[in-house]
Image (spheres, rainbow, N blue to C red):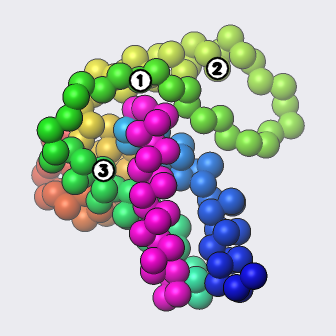
Amino acid sequence: MDPLLSEFDSFVRTRTPALLRSAYLLTGDQHLAEDLVQSALARTHRSWGRLHDSGNAEAYTRKIMYHLQVSWWRRRRVAESMPGNLPEPRGGDSAPDHAQQTTLRLTLRAALAKLSAKQRAVLVLRFFEDRTETEAADLLGVTGGTVKNR
């Protein structure tokens, strides 16, 4: 197997769960999140030759995800629904409290459903990804004031 292909395969296998969590928070739908990640990874693959040594492959992929999401906002779309489940992080030694997790998931889903796609993207970038207002604005291609107002 080609070493570059092997490195890309490893990148996809290790980083896809984290990318899916971010994409789900951006889109509010499991299927749309999967489409977003797949599209971003396809574009990352095209640039893999220059990315694999830089260590910036995940940042590049996330930036593509945010740009794709912004371009999808600009297209007319059917109203969103949130039928999917939030992907759970892997690992952890303690037994989960399923009732508490379910309540938290339902509360989060209800709150996210009330927001526009742009507002969700700002929340994901600012609080889930821990980006500054300036970084979020740059990634979304909007002004800092727009990020503050969302």
Q: Is residue 17 highlighted in magenta?
A: no
Query: Residue at point 45% right, 42% down?
Result: 33
Q: Looking at the rendered structure, which numbered label has been put on residue 82?
A: 1
Q: CA distance from mark 3 to mark 1?
A: 16 Å
The residue shown at (50%, 73%) is 45
- Observer able to see residue 125: yes
Sequence order check, earlier mark of 2 and 1: 1
Q: Is residue 120 left or right of residue 82?
A: left
What is the x, y in percent for residue 20? 53, 46
Q: Which residue is identified by label 2?
A: 101
Three-letter code, disc 3: Gln
Most frequent secondary structure within the magenta stretch: helix
* Label 1 crowd bin: few (<14), some (14–19), many (20+), radius 10 Å: some
User: Which one is nearer the viewer's eye here, 29 or 105?
Assistant: 29
Q: Dot 2: what SS?
A: helix
Q: Residue at x 22, y 28 (%)?
A: 78
Image-quadrant location for residue 64: bottom left
Q: Is residue 51 above or below residue 24?
A: below
Residue 114 rendering spot, x and y as whole percentages: 29, 21
Amino acid type at image mark 2: Gln
Q: Nearer the viewer, mark 2 or mark 3?
A: 3
| In the image: residue 128, left or right of residue 142 | right
Q: Earlier in the sequence, mark 2 or mark 3?
A: 3
The residue mark sitting in front, 2 or 1, is: 1
Q: Which residue is mark 3?
A: 69
Q: Which span is picked out in magenta?
A: 28-51
* Whole-percent x, y for residue 85 in the image: 55, 26
Q: For the residues marked 2 and 1, what is the alpha-carbon distance in whole angstroms? A: 17 Å
| Mark 2 in CB contact with mark 3 (< 8 angstroms) | no
Q: Quadrant of the C terminus?
A: top left
